[in-house]
Image (tube, coloured by chain):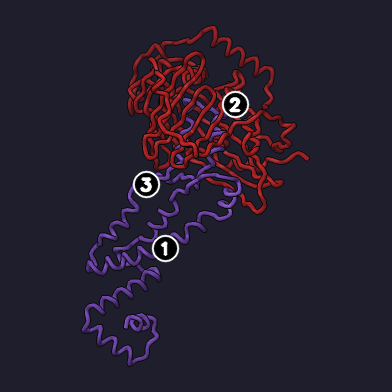
Chain colours: A red, B purple
Amino acid sequence: MADIKPMAMAKAWLFVGLCALCGQSFTSQAVTIGSGQPSTVMSELAVADPLAWLDRIGKASRQLNYIGTFSYQTGWRTETSRIVHRYAGGVESERMEVLDGSPREVIRQGKEVRCVLPAQHSVIIGQTDTRGSFPGRLPQSYVELTGNYHVRLDGVWRIAGHEAQKLMLEPRDELRFGHVLWAELHSGLVLKSQVLDTKGGVVEQFAFSDVHIGGKVGDAMLAPRVKVDADWRVIDVGGDSETQFTSQWILKNPLPGFALMTMMRHRTGGALQMVFSDGLAAISIFIEPAEAGVEARGAYPGGGAVNVFERVAAGHRITVLGEVPASLVQRAAEAVEVVK
Amino acid sequence: MKEKLSAMLDGDVDDVTARVLFVRLKHDKAFRGEWDAYCLLGDLIRGYAPPELEGFTERVMFRLEREPTILIPSSRKDRDKAVRHSWRHRLLPLAASVMGVLAVAGVVAVLSNNGAPAPTVASVQAVETPVAVPAVSHSVRDGARHDYLVAHQALAGGPMPAVVQYVRTVSSVQPEE
């Protein structure tokens, strides 16, 4: 974990306290609304503080009911998907279906997430962790975020028929990507998101084309549509918590701005997974025994903003992936070593 | 006689046989067709393609390189075997056979249409048509392992609605395109 100085911690708690006192402290300010070109309009719903916006965004994605269609674009490729999200009794339920090509489906019920891949006859089951919730781990996340990113508001825009506050998270170094978020003005739900490379180019983009926020979401809308046959392969990537002491693996050099969030041992396959976060982006390091003669692939793209680096060390295959520049996953992979 | 024609292209016939072959070429249209076909095949093998087939090889190889590989990690042994036998080793024989079949088809088409763009060639050109080509730029072969991606996204979180993060996992699957 990153060391947090007492003064920084005090400031962070002070900030959180002020936010709590003010609640959803909406202020009246001049904002811009536009589609393509901003125009000046007054809104009572503009939250002045960008960090307060991040808090709203994190809560909105978890605690709202919404149904919408969004596109995911990376490189030349665009795919359209449908999402239904329900929050009831403190439990999140979600269903996402890719509408283009093979009808791939992601179903979430509470902490369990199932990715159904019909063409592969496979189902991958994962367990979500609230430690991964964005922005997560208050107030440390604010300290980490502002230390790694310059966070600022950039006007109000029109996205999918809704007014949306634009937030810029500009990296303070070249070890992380930039992020641009457009959050619905009233609820804080992110309607559009871009990941920018170190030159400002868009690496990937999520954008709702239509979304309905609020209202009832029935069980039928969350029910799986893809039939899973008995002979399909089921891959469980859940695991049990592990400590650095028992894992026997360490990073000999720290990753600037990244702190260890969690460590777990996969029940299937026995891979050790370490997750590091800078408050926004995350890196996972997977370590599992490598069979003799296996060659590491080195660097390769993992899809969208994800970069991967793989190497073999001490008889183990070390795979690092994350939504960060390729140089950082390589740096992380090369920093992994076994405790002797 | 076809064998002698082929041999003449390779410079493996004597002068007398060559003269006989040239006489027949002068008077026999079908025989000239055979000759043209051999010449075109030779050109293709040496890398010289007529305008109708311009960029043909690149288009086929471009498509093949981006063809998704079915990823069913049935066992670690299989996965490691897949790594050892990289995609090039697996695709090259396929590429070679595809090239062979399409080259012959292209030759026949060019010859039978007197140089005009042939239906077979047109269908080959369709290989490079839009959507599908960029759509496989992040195929499973290029992407990360699905189980790793799911495990990562389960713990990593992010600003977008939770399940949306998983679109990276399912979007890397394009077996039907």
Residue at the (53%, 42%) spot, across then down: B144
| Residue situated furthest right in the rendering | A340
Residue A255 image-quadrant placement: top right
Question: Residue A147 — which label?
Answer: 2
How many C-alpha atoms fall within 10 Å of the one at disc 2: few (<14), some, or many (≥20)?
some
In front of the other: label 3 or label 1? 1
| Residue situated furthest top in the rendering | A21
In front of the other: label 2 or label 1? 1
The amino acid beneath tag 2 is Gly
Foreground of the two, B72 or B63: B72
How many C-alpha atoms fall within 10 Å of the one at disc 3: few (<14), some, or many (≥20)?
some
Q: In the rendering, at what x and y percent does residue A320 appear?
A: 60, 40
Taking the image as shown, residue A41 lies to the left or right of residue B170, namely: left
In front of the other: label 2 or label 3? 3
The amino acid beneath tag 1 is Ser
Residue A274 versus residue A167 in the image, above or below: below
Residues under labels 2 and 1: Cα distance?
A: 56 Å
| Residue situated furthest front in the rendering | A230
Foreground of the two, A319 or A45: A319
> Is the C terminus of chain A in the top left, top right, bottom left or bottom right quadrant?
top right
How many C-alpha atoms fall within 10 Å of the one at disc 1: few (<14), some, or many (≥20)?
few
Task: Tell me the residue that label 3 is attached to.
Answer: B132
Question: Residue A54 — which label?
Answer: none
Task: Tell me the residue that label 1 is attached to.
Answer: B97
Chain letter for mark 3, please.
B
Residue A151 versus residue B60 in the image, above or below: above
Residue at the (42%, 33%) spot, across then down: A226
Q: In the rendering, at what x and y percent does residue B73 appear?
A: 54, 44
Among numbered discs 3 and 1, the one appearing first in the sequence: 1
Q: In the rendering, at what x and y percent does residue A229 appear?
A: 46, 36
